[in-house]
Image (cartoon, rainbow, N blue to C red):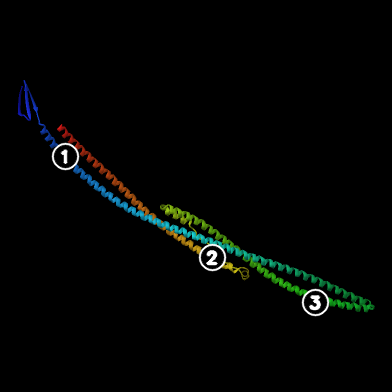
């Protein structure tokens, strides 16, 4: 066997018999040097890749951060708008509470007016009682007049009977005297008696005339009483009619007041719903307007009576009625003011709802932007993960090559 080597460190040739063997021998130090050179190139490529990918990732991340900052700014603006909406809503609730307080005051005033009307009705009832007493007195006068008329009629009957008797006596006396002259003495006596009868008859006639005069005076007085009684009855009927009208007006006022109280209770309930549920303020306020028809249509209760009725009725009734009318007008004015306040609350509530809708729209836009930023951030994270994976793979390959060469 013979050997040949042109460079013992690199190429060795061995010959055995007719066969020749050639071996390429590379020293380990040179292999390591080559591997380190390749690893440096790989690391340089990896650094370049990492730098480019990292720069792109950082640029994307910076854009995502800018978008996130813009979203945060928009969110802060939305929060400020929401706080303003909450402040407006609180103001609307305060106004609604004030309206409720005013409505309660109107209800109290209406109750006072109803009490005053009840007092007026009581006074008118007293007037009716007085009128009934006047009618009773008139009936008694009529009864007395009827008795006087009956007595006068009896006197007239008695006077007529006396006259008839006197005429009969005179006729009998004249006939007796003319028929029998012997009885002249008796006739004279009879004549004397007849004269006495005549005197008595004259006295009776005078008495009868006086009775007739008294009867005529009584009849005249009775007629005057009847005229006065008729006037009293007419005035009493007018008083009763006016009182009935007053009672009807008072009943209508009481019915309207009951309606006012019912409507006010509904207003209070609706207002409580408004306070409890701010986003529904506008709808509830509309319900309040629908239920808040608390205007009382009270007619004036002024008594229109004649002088005699005024004499029988108490002046305090008219004064009380005027006072009640003034209170009723005041209640109507308060109710109108409450309606105006409620309308103002509705306007404020509508403005709050419009502002709240705008805030909700801004918030939805911010949420959409935030979602887009999250999508971009996820993409950046995915890119960064991919770059990290590539870098890890390069480092793993380089480490594996170096370790294999060292082994």
Residue plotted at (53% across, 59% down): 257
Relative to 298, 131 lies left or right: right
Q: Which quadrant would the N terminus be assigned to in this image?
A: top left
Asked if one can make out residue 113 in the rendered structure from this viewpoint, the answer is yes
Marks 1 and 2, how far apart in space? Answer: 104 Å
- Name the residue carrying label 2: 325
- Circles 1, 3 touching at the beta carbon (< 8 Å): no
Question: Could you say where residue 336 lies in the image, as x and y percent from the top left?
Answer: 47, 62
Q: Nearer the viewer, mark 1 or mark 2?
A: 1
As drawn, which residue projects farthest toward the top? 17
Q: In this view, does 110 lie above or below 177?
A: above
Question: Could you say where residue 88 lies in the image, as x and y percent from the top left?
Answer: 38, 56
Number of other residues with Cα within 10 Å of mark 2, as a class: few under 14, some 14 to 19, many 20 or more? many
- Name the residue carrying label 3: 206
Relative to 202, 7 lies left or right: left
Which corner quadrant of the image does residue 345 belong to? Answer: bottom left
Marks 1 and 3, how far apart in space? Answer: 169 Å
Residue plotted at (56% across, 68% down): 319
Marks 2 and 3, how far apart in space? Answer: 66 Å
- Name the residue carrying label 1: 43
Q: Which of 371 and 242 is in front in this view?
A: 371
Residue plotted at (29% across, 44% down): 375
């Amino acid at each position: 066997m013979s050997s040949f080597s042109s460079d013992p460190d690199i190429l060795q040739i061995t010959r055995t018999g007719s066969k020749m063997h050639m071996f390429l021998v590379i020293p380990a130090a040179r292999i390591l040097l080559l591997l380190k050179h390749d690893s440096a190139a790989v690391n340089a490529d990896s650094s370049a890749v990492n730098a480019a990918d990292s720069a792109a990732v950082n640029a994307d991340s910076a854009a995502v951060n800018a978008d996130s900052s813009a979203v945060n700014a928009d969110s802060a603006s939305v929060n400020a708008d929401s706080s303003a909406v909450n402040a407006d809503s609180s103001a609307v609730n305060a106004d609604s509470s004030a309206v409720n307080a005013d409505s309660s005051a109107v209800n109290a005033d209406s109750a006072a007016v109803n009490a005053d009307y009840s007092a007026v009705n009581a006074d008118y009832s007293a007037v009716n009682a007085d009128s009934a007493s006047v009618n009773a007195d008139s009936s008694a006068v009529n009864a007395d007049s009827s008795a006087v008329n009956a007595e006068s009629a009896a006197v007239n009957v008695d006077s007529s009977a006396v006259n008839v008797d006197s005429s009969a006596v005179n006729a009998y006396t004249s006939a007796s005297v003319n028929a029998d002259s012997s009885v002249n003495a008796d006739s004279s006596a009879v004549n004397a008696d007849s004269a006495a009868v005549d005197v008595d008859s004259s006295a009776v006639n005078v008495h009868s005339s006086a009775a007739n005069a008294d009867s005529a005076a009584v009849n005249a007085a009775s007629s005057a009483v009847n005229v006065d009684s008729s006037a009293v009855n007419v005035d009493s009927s007018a008083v009763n009619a006016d009182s009935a009208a007053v009672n009807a007006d008072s009943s209508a006022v009481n019915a309207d007041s009951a309606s006012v109280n019912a409507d006010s209770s509904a207003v209070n309930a609706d207002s409580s719903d408004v306070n409890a549920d701010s986003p529904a303020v506008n709808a509830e306020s509309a319900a309040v307007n629908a239920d808040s028809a608390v205007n009382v249509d009270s007619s004036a209760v002024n008594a229109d009576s004649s002088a005699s009725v005024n004499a029988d009725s108490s002046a305090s009734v008219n004064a009380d009625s005027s006072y009640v009318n003034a209170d009723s007008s005041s209640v109507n004015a308060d109710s109108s003011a409450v309606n105006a306040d409620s309308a103002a609350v509705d306007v404020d509530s509508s403005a709050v709802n419009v502002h709240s809708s705008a805030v909700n729209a801004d918030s939805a836009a911010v949420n959409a932007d935030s979602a887009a930023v999250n999508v971009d951030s996820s993409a950046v994270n995915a890119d960064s993960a991919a770059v990290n994976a590539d870098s890890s793979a390069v480092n793993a390959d380089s480490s594996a090559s170096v370790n294999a060469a060292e082994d």
